Image (cartoon, rainbow, N blue to C red):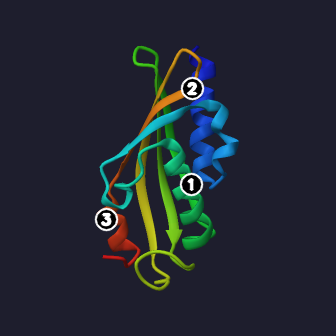
Amino acid sequence: MTSTAFSNAKKVFECIDTAKTFDTISEYVEEDATFNCQAAAMNDLNTVKDYSDWMVDFGIQTVPGYTYDVHCCAWDENTKTAMYFATFHATHTGPGGPVEPTNKTMHANYTYCAVMNEDNKITEMTKVWNDGYSMTEIGWA
């Protein structure tokens, strides 16, 4: 299970972080898989699909041309959890957000944790992200 589950989780992380639609990852995610993030910007996002859709809108419209750097990925066999640590680099140049484009840039560190089931699909995904710091950097706070 390790290699398949971990590989599937990485595919999901990479598709979400490149603003691919949920259709590209649905085969790796249980229907209604939960999404958790203790960040005010994501209070209304409850499923992995919700988060994926949010990233498509944010990434394509609000911060087009963003990039990210992956620092490490890990797999915990005991908990069937994949982890992914990266930094998101984005400049607010497009429509969206609480203000007109600021042309300010954020460099946001974040971590994803995804719990996998026996079918090698994500059942729960958590994002650890300091949205307050990012919103200040990008000029939204």
Judging by the rendered image, the residue that carries numbered circle 3 is 133
Q: Nearer the viewer, mark 2 or mark 3?
A: 2
Give the SS element for disc 1: helix
The label shown at residue 10 is none
Give the SS element for disc 2: loop
The label shown at residue 53 is 1
Asked if marks 3 and 1 touch (Cβ < 8 Å), the reply is: no
**Residue furthest front in the image:** 32
Q: Distance from label 2 to label 3 (Cα)?
A: 32 Å
Judging by the rendered image, the residue that carries numbered circle 2 is 121
Quarter placement of the C terminus: bottom left
**Residue at 42%, 51% in the rendered image:** 45
Say which amino acid is labelled 2: Lys
Say which amino acid is labelled 1: Asp
The earlier-in-sequence mark between 2 and 3 is 2
**Residue at 58%, 51% in the rendered image:** 17
**Residue at 46%, 73% in the rendered image:** 105
Q: Is residue 138 above or below residue 43?
A: below
